[in-house]
Image: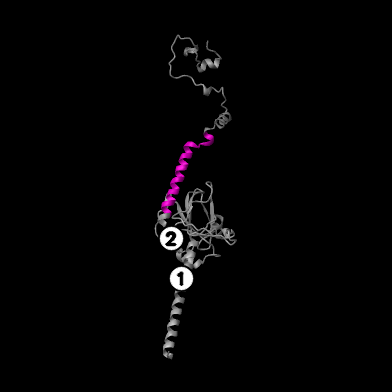
């Protein structure tokens, strides 16, 4: 075989190796992006906790990863509350938002989340928030976010606070994540991939909450119908079992002159005048 042929084969082989290297690097990069997106969506967040469990072979057992469509089910107790969120504005001013004065939708977003990019874009325009709630974006602090990048993506959007502490206090599993607060009470939360999903499912959470409140007004009125509580309130007002206000005069019969009874009153009744004299019916 001639030297020219060998040289050609070597060049072809080198080109093939270079092409395969480019393909492998592309696959590795794509795989890394997929893993990062799954992490941002909250998939496999229990990895560190469950990695310690062992399989029958003695090694680490498999970690189940489940993805759900739309807003995930809340993991908090029914009476969970968040009354205040504190953080820095984009101008670096310390701010505190009172969540007990109405309805608020907290959007926990980051600049490194690919799904969040969709929400940053959508929130620049007018959006209809379920239940007329006020939107508040909560980003992480300067320890985990780039202020310049955050200012770029948040421009033209709703009010924003920078607070890693708020993320930790509410145990936010990942981004994007939304928490709906009605006068300090958490009535809905979860993650989604589009604003349409958030609007529909948070709207359902608000409707369910209003339904429960309406039922409570009818069925669970508490101390208002408690006999012990009612008696205590009457006694506190000076109204006892023998109080005259509990025995009103009949008003459905007109007095007939000449009938038994004092002062022309019907038989068996007493007028105010006779009661004042201490007369008793006969």
Majority secondary structure of the magenta segment? helix
* Lower position in the chain sequence, tag 2 or tag 1: 1
Q: Is residue 200 magenta?
A: yes
Q: Position of residue 88 (x, y in %)?
A: 53, 60
Name the image colouring.
one colour
Res. 119 mark: 2
- Taking depth in this image into account, of 253 and 43 the one nearest to the observer is 43
Q: Is residue 9 left or right of residue 235?
A: left
Q: Is residue 147 above or below residue 242?
A: below
Q: Establish if 91 lies above or below 132.
A: below
Residue 19: percent from left, percent from top: 43, 77
Residue under the point 52% across and 23% down? 246
Camera-near label (2 vs 1) is 1
Dot 2 lies on which element? helix
Answer whether residue 111 is visible to the viewer in this image. Answer: no
Residue 49 position, x and y percent, is 58, 58
Residue range highlighted in magenta: 198-224
Q: Nearer the viewer, residue 81 or 190?
A: 190
**Residue at left offset 45%, top offset 72%:** 26
Q: Which residue is mark 1?
A: 27
Q: Is residue 201 visible?
A: yes
Q: Measure the C-alpha gap from mark 2 to mark 1.
A: 27 Å
Q: Percent from the top left, x then y, of residue 161?
A: 51, 59
Q: In the image, is residue 227 part of the stretch drawn in magenta?
A: no
SS label for mark 1:
helix
Please give the name of the residue rendered at 40% of the width and 55% of the height, measured from the top-left corner: 196
Q: Quadrant of the N terminus?
A: bottom left
């Amino acid at each position: 075989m001639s030297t020219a042929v060998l040289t050609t084969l070597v060049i072809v082989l080198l080109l093939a190796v270079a092409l395969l290297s480019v393909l492998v690097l592309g696959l590795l990069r794509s795989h890394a992006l997929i893993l990062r997106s799954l992490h941002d969506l909250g998939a496999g967040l229990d990895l560190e906790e469950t990695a310690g469990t062992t399989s029958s072979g003695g090694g680490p057992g498999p970690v189940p990863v489940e993805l759900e469509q739309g807003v995930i089910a809340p993991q908090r107790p029914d009476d969970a509350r968040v009354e205040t969120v504190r953080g820095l504005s984009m101008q670096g001013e310390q701010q505190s938002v009172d969540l007990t004065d109405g309805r608020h939708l907290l959007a926990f977003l980051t600049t490194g989340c690919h799904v969040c990019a969709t929400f940053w874009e959508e929130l620049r325009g007018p959006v209809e928030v379920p239940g007329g709630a006020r939107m508040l974006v909560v980003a992480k602090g300067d320890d985990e976010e780039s202020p310049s990048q955050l200012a770029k993506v948040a421009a033209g959007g709703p009010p924003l606070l920078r607070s890693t502490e708020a993320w930790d206090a509410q145990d936010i599993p990942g981004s994007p994540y939304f928490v709906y607060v009605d006068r300090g009470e958490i009535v809905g939360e979860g993650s989604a991939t589009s604003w349409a999903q958030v609007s529909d499912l948070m709207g359902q959470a608000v409707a369910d909450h209003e339904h429960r409140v309406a039922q409570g007004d009818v069925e669970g009125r508490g101390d208002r119908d408690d006999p012990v509580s009612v008696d205590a309130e009457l006694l506190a007002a000076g109204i006892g079992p023998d109080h005259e206000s509990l025995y009103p005069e009949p008003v459905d019969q007109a007095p007939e002159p000449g009938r038994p009874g004092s002062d022309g009153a019907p038989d068996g009744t007493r007028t105010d005048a006779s009661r004042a004299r201490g007369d008793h019916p006969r």
